[in-house]
Amino acid sequence: MARPAHQWDTSGIKHMKIEEEPQYANSNVAPIVDAMETERIVESLVKFDITQVGSSAWMEQHRKLEKLNIQAHQNAMTNSDEFVLEAVLTFNKFETLLHDLLLIETWKENVYPLLLEPLTGRNNMRLYFILYHEATLINLFEVFMYYRHVCEAGGEKMLELVDYIGRKLARLNNTSYEFRQHDQEEEEVGATVESAKKFADALQARSPTEELRKHFMDIEFRICISAVSIARFLSEHADAMPLSVVSRITDTHDFLVLIIPLIENPPWTRRLSTGKWQKLVDHKWAEVKPIDLLKITKLEGQPWLAVYYLLAKEVFRERYYLNSFRKGQLLRVRKYINDLMLDQLPFLADIQRYMDELAVTDVPEPASLGNSAFLFQQVASMQEAISKGRKWPEVAQLQVDTVFTLTDKDDKELMRLADLYADDMAGVLSEDVGDA
């Protein structure tokens, strides 16, 4: 007689054999660079002057960093040895990478606008790779900052990174900034034949200047989104960093006040003109059904985690003084903590209870600094050294004469970079930042 079936019956279930692996295991993926080559690449990294941005040597280092970035994400996704990170720490190249990040940010803000007119149409591809360099570096830091010992090893230099993240969070909060107002019609490509044809015509009619502007906005948006994750890691590992860095987080930039508006007006959620909702998942816009809008994505959880650490960490509680302004800002997000949210993020129960107690607690008014005789603040020396004494029109003209001497079609260095980006696995891994 056959045995009756019940809910614990596993006779019809296929079990994993020894030679099989789960679908999420990517350990068989061939590395982009192995551990020995990684050490050679990391050891060869150098600091450049701002006049050298885009030069042959600089482009070669960009190509190497792109390889390291892809490999670092592959290591994180497959839970394998983090030999890229260990090589950076072993050869003391964390400061070099941080200098490179600040260098390209300064170049974008001060030199790039002056190069648009003389170079647009003849050096678009080289300009694009230069702009993308900042996204490569911030992706790399996003992997590194997950680890507490990296923050500890950074020491006082973490102050420069905190300043950088503060600037990006402020830009992301600026709803008048262009990437918060960009045209969303093109995201609906493929809905109908007419819309696809309309989009193709728009692409064909787009000028080289408009193409570069679009790339600039897309890259800047990606960078600012990655900055939110790094802000969470900085908040989480604050007790491993010097007090000067903690003071920068709480007093100078006030990360709590910078992060609250991102919960109220999230840049990673949008509604198209057709009424469809989209969320940013792994740096790609994905359609979301209205019934699933309250499901928290990995990116949406980052600001909540940052708020939790900013309020719960002892190092912040000792230094962060709540006044009436900060109290009002914090209580703005109390209405978003509901049962569905608590099911997904249980740690918010402590924050909810704290906010309820704070609502009935009197706090002092913001203190005035008018009576202070002195106000000392540590200077971001690396950022200052990059831009001090520079005459930006002269820097731009020097680059036109010495760096951008070839057109895109004659530039063999661009072909080497194109081969790297054309790798299918590299493309997939570079988009999967959130999985790290």
Image (cartoon, grey):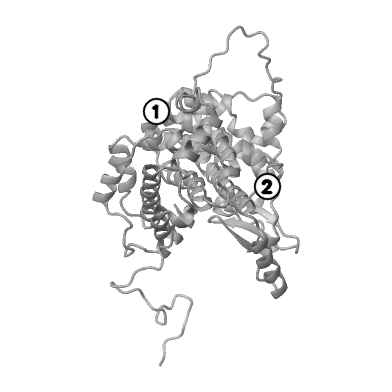
**What residue did someone put label 2 on?**
180
Name the N-terminal-most of marks 2 and 1. 1
Q: Can residue 266 be spotted in the picture?
A: no
Q: Which image quadrant is residue 370 in?
A: top right
Which residue type does callout 1 highlight?
Gly
Image marks 2 and 1: residues in contact by CB distance under 8 Å:
no
Q: Can residue 224 be spotted in the picture?
A: yes
Q: Is residue 418 left or right of residue 280?
A: left
Residue furthest toward the bottom? 1
Q: Which image quadrant is residue 302 in?
A: top right
Q: Point out residue 290 in the picture as x, y percentages from the top left corner.
A: 70, 62
Q: Is residue 178 left or right of residue 220?
A: right
Task: Please name which of the two marks, 2 or 1, marks the residue nearer to the observer.
Answer: 2
Q: Residue at x 50, y 27 (%)?
A: 387
**What residue did someone put label 1 on?**
155
Q: Is residue 189 left or right of residue 6?
A: right
Q: Residue at x 54, y 45 (%)?
A: 223
| Mark 2, secondary structure of its residue | helix
Q: Residue at x 68, y 66 (%)?
A: 201
Is disc 1 surrounded by few (<14), some (14 to 19) or many (20+) residues within 10 Å?
some
Foreground pick, 195 / 152: 195
**In the depicted structure, whether residue 153 falls above or below residue 86:** above
> Whole-Å distance between the Cαs marked 2 and 1?
34 Å
Q: Point out residue 281 in the picture as x, y percentages from the top left corner.
A: 56, 57
Which residue type does callout 2 highlight?
Arg
**In the depicted structure, whether residue 250 falls above or below residue 17:** above
Q: Is residue 224 left or right of residue 54?
A: right
